[in-house]
Amino acid sequence: MAAVTYKLIKQCPRTGARLGKLITPHGEIDTPVFMPVGTQASVKGISPEELEALGAKIILSNTYHLFLRPGHELVAEAGGLHKFMNWNGSILTDSGGFQVFSLSDLRKITEEGVAFRSHLDGAKLFLSPEKAMEIENALGADIMMAFDECTPYPSTYDYTKRSLERTTRWAERCLKAHKNTEKQSLFGIVQGGTFADLRKKSAREIVSLDFPGYAIGGLSVGEATQTMYDMLEETVPELPENKARYLMGVGRPDNLVEGVMRGIDMFDCVLPTRIGRNGTALTSRGRVIVRDAKYAHDFSPIDPECNCPACRNHSKAYIRHLLKAGEMYGLRLMTIHNLYYLVHLMGDIRKAIAEDRFPEFREEFYEKLAGNRC
């Protein structure tokens, strides 16, 4: 029995949207779900208690960054990531692959793994499938991701084919190296770039290894939005219905709605916290750049349809003042609002699927944006 399992509850009869439940050692999560990103064992600007209060059930932490600092051995000594960061919900850790491969001028890929230099101090380091599993087992997250090669965009067909085949071989090595199978589940990752036949090839190879869940990687890395949707339509039908489907690194509201329509259950992205710290809010009517001068005398909430603490208690004018003055409270309010918005957007999506009105919900979502898509 896998440590993490997925239960399909209902599927929209007119689209691929799915209502489900992800069962983990640290609780059950209703899906589709958005996972806030806590890169370094902390979601920037918000406490675990605040995350729980806004409705988050699962967060993502970054293997690469925790490997570099403070080190997986220290986290294990603290009793694992849950105890280290005082988070009682579920945790997913990525493999570090995306971060390592983004260091294009600081790393070298071989069949054995990736040699790279730390972005912190230039130290020479090496990450292999076996090392990634060692780190993730030490961190103790409920869901671990296999170490894959994140194919850059654009890439040639031949390079993409070689890359995905290496990802398959590395996935096999990850399965052999994964030790704590009773308390942690390992998900496989599908690659294949923007080539439909390679996406299908990768999906079939990874599915044949019988992971308890599957991620789709290598999208939202620079390709056109429609291309991402096309690749989902080619890939998702190759994935089993009785296991979770995770689209990595995607968090734009319209991308979430479209991903759900194509059968995706899990999403994550740094977007809500990153743009929030820069003064931009996600709302039911599109993005609102609270820093803009036009909001200096606007005493209405960021989003009148939102019930987060920022919208209940403060105006755009006040939050803009905090941001312009460099007050930390302003950054925190923006972070809380954006995370609340995405977590509750997913809740609204789940309700729509349950009530057999997801297509209508999608239409209403775009009508509210009034041509100003996020």
Image (cartoon, helix red, strand yellow):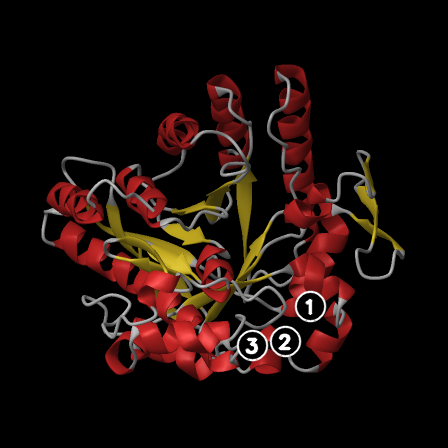
Q: Position of residue 321 (x, y in %)?
A: 42, 76
Q: Earlier in the sequence, mark 2 or mark 1?
A: 2
Q: Quadrant of residue 232?
A: top left
Neighbours of disc 2 within 10 Å: few (<14), some (14-19), many (20+)? many
Looking at the image, is mark 3 or mark 1 nearer the viewer?
A: 3
Say left or right for 188 vs 96: left
Front in this rendered view, residue 338 or 361: 338
Q: Which residue is mark 2?
A: 80
Identified by mark 1, the residue type is Ala
Is 74 placed left or right of 30 in the picture? right
**Do the CB atoms of the residues marked 3 and 2 lie less than 8 Å apart?**
yes
Determine whether 360 is above or below 56 in the image. above
Q: Residue at x 71, y 42 (%)?
A: 101
Q: Residue 288 at x, y = what percent?
A: 33, 58
Q: Name the residue that disc number 3 marks.
A: 82
Q: Considering the numbered disc 3 on the image, is that residue within a helix, a strand or a loop?
A: helix
Nearest to N terminus: mark 3 or mark 1:
3
> How far from the left and from the top, in percent, is residue 36?
46, 63
CB under 8 Å between callouts 2 and 1? yes
Residue 169 falls in image quadrant = top right
> Does dot 2 land on a helix, a strand or a loop?
loop
Dot 3 alpha-carbon crowd within 10 angstroms: few under 14, some 14 to 19, many 20 or more = many
What residue type is disc 3 on?
A: His
Of residue 286 and residue 48, the one placed in the foreground of this image is 286
Q: Please name the residue that numbered disc 1 is placed on.
A: 138
Marks 3/1: CA distance? 11 Å
Residue that appears at 50% across and 36% down: 219
Q: Can residue 186 be seen at all in this image of the molecule?
A: yes
